[in-house]
Image (cartoon, rainbow, N blue to C red):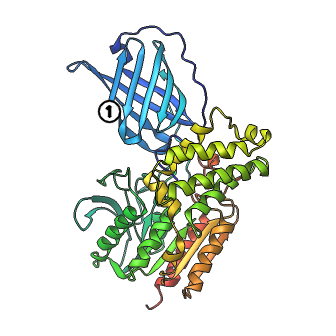
Amino acid sequence: MKRISLLAVYSLLPVTLFLSITVQAQQLADDWHGTLQAFPIIVHITWNNANKNYQATMDSPEQNAYGYAFDSFTVVDNQVKATMAQLHVTMEGTIENTNRINGQWKQGMVQLPFIMDRGKLEIAKPVRPQEPFPPFPYHTTDVTFTNTDKSITYGGTLTTPEAGKNFPVALLISGSGAQNRNSEIFGHKPFLLIADYLTRHGIAVLRVDDRGVGQTTGHYQGSTIADFTKDAAAAVAYLKTRKDIINPKKIGLIGHSEGGAIAPTLVAGDKDIAFMVLLAGPGVNGKNVMLAQNKAIASAIDSNSVNAYLELYGKITDLVLATDTTGLYTRTIKMGEQWLKQQTPQTLSTLGITAENISRQTLVLAYAMSNPEIKSVLAYDPLPVLSNVKCPVLALNGSKDVQIVASLNLPGIKKILTESGNKDVTTIELPGLNHLFQTAGTGMPSEYKTITETFSPKALEQISSWILQHTNKTR
């Protein structure tokens, strides 16, 4: 969900480079800002007088992403070029005047218009009335621990009730994209809120920065569900050492979205896990999850066009997931051209696809799906995983979730678990909630930042009461 994903919606728009003037290099040193697909972007440009070169960093405040450094930032006459390998970004533009750079943002195979204006960008702090602030009526401890080979050091926060010990504990596992321990997006801090609520009700909580984020070392780029499962296992191993405050026999997992695939993958191999909560977790294979997601998000257009697009999406997915991906991009182009010939002019017009752009459109999808994390999500099959989960399971989903569609995934989770012999399975579809468990209007991702509610109180109560019910049982 919440990656530094500046390319959430793909489009191919022409860019006009205006007649420009030459500006002396040092004059660009300043704060600049622009917008990429509704996300405000801030670029800090400085001039290194000793080396006579530019240095630049990028912030995306609404995605809680700060200080992403460009590897290079060069100016030749009135042409600007910057590169950032970790995000596969190239930014090129023309200095239109002393206060504007007009050009393109290229990420992978996607190109988007990007205009930067000089000056600080004032972003109003969003209203988030549920966010808790200290002093808290419980203990909050920043902790660090390592994985088995000590290649990664993890930074997190452990919250424990104020009095007593031997508490049940929940490890929070985030969804897709590099996230901090609060799973912060658009000013919302859902994991902070969940930890606060549960700890106030007698449940300890550990929340951890993703690898490569905050106080956790390592690299996020190129990681997969298997890697994130190892990270979660390291956190569980740490919790097992905290017998001074928690009950090692009452360690559970709460996974959101992709975390709802990571959690059962870990539980299937660790029979010591006492309980599992899936928040908008997948109950069908990754390909079908994404097809349903695309169908739900595109519900406003005619069904013929939607079905045609889903056919294209499915075929590209199959190519990406094939055992042999030799010549993937060449085969993707060929398949796209064949698909194009079978479509009506009306369908192509609705989808904005032409003979001129079909190759780029299909390559954009194939390139995105080939990202190791996305590919592991598409390849995820819950059947062999959930079949080996024997601990109590609570699965919650919002009725307005368009990313993990409740009507498809909740029945899938229940069917697999019950048919494999798990006798303690609860699945609940919560009316009116979206993928982030906010009370929503449409459920579309465009609403996430406009909703002041961070996490539904009804969902919080469901999670808390279920965990307390199960951890108070004798195991």
34 left or right of 428 in image:
left
Q: Identify the residue at image location x=62%, y=62%.
A: 288
Against 186, residue 372 (above or below) is below
Against 1, residue 232 (above or below) is below
User: Quadrant where the C terminus lies?
Assistant: bottom left
Q: Position of residue 412 (x, y in %)?
A: 62, 73
165 left or right of 431 in image:
left
User: Residue 71: which quarter of the image?
Assistant: top left
Q: Position of residue 33 (x, y in %)?
A: 48, 27
8 left or right of 133 in image:
right
Given the current orientation, which residue lies at the most extreme left position?
Answer: 50
Given the current orientation, which residue lies at the most extreme bottom position?
Answer: 474
| Residue highlighted by disc 1 | 71
Q: Identify the residue at image location x=42%, y=31%.
A: 90
Against 119, residue 330 (above or below) is below
Three-letter residue code for mark 1: Asp
| Crowding near the residue tagged with mark 1, few <14, some 14–19, many ≥20 C-alpha atoms within 10 Å | some
Q: Position of residue 303 (x, y in %)?
A: 78, 52
Q: Position of residue 401 (x, y in %)?
A: 65, 59
Label 1 residue SS: loop
Of 6 and 190, nearer the camera is 6
The answer to whether residue 9 is visible is: no
The answer to whether residue 29 is visible is: yes
Q: How many marks?
A: 1
User: Residue 149: which quarter of the image?
Assistant: bottom left
Of 371 and 331, nearer the camera is 331
Of 468 and 351, nearer the camera is 351
Q: Identify the residue at image location x=29%, y=79%.
A: 243
Given the current orientation, which residue lies at the most extreme top position?
Answer: 21
